[in-house]
Amino acid sequence: MSLIRYADEGFFAPAKIADVFRTTREEIARSAGLGRDAVQRKDRVRSDRTQRRLREVVEIVNKVEPRFGSALLAYAWFRSEPLAGFSGQTAMQLVRSGRAEEVLDYIDAVDAGIHA
């Protein structure tokens, strides 16, 4: 899906992300491992750290969305499905601990048939 639906003025917008995932900005912040201020204050929303974490969440959800048929179901997977090989951690838990690249590599490996 297009990244435009998650952005506003060239930045990932927590309110738009929350709208697509049918949740709150505060829940998006928790999912990305950010504080509530990071998604409420304009200067914090535009910070490199906040934008990187929001991008990671959106990138992972976008990557698996075709499997689930909707962003909402892909977001539910992101939050709740334990990933094989990661000690039962979910994609959300891994992103929160700064391991988004490992999640993306895992998804690529599953797509390539390496993990079943």
Image (cartoon, helix red, strand yellow):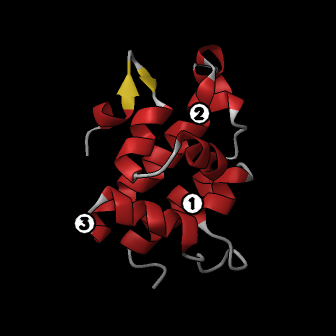
Which residue type does callout 1 highlight? Val
Asked if one can make out residue 102 in the rendered structure from this viewpoint, the answer is: yes
Residue closest to the eye, 13 or 86: 13
* Element at label 2: helix
Q: x, y percentage for residue 86?
A: 68, 74
Q: Which residue is drawn at 29% across and 31% down?
A: 4
Give the mark nearest the N terminus, 2 or 3. 2
Disc tally is 3
Which residue type does callout 2 highlight? Arg
Q: Residue at x 61, y 43 (%)?
A: 26
Q: Which residue is drawn at 55% across and 64% down?
A: 79
Residue closest to the eye, 19 or 90: 19
Residue designated by label 2: 52
Residue designated by label 1: 103
Question: Can you say which quadrant of the picture contains the C terminus?
Answer: bottom left
Q: x, y percentage for residue 13?
A: 46, 29
Residue designated by label 3: 69
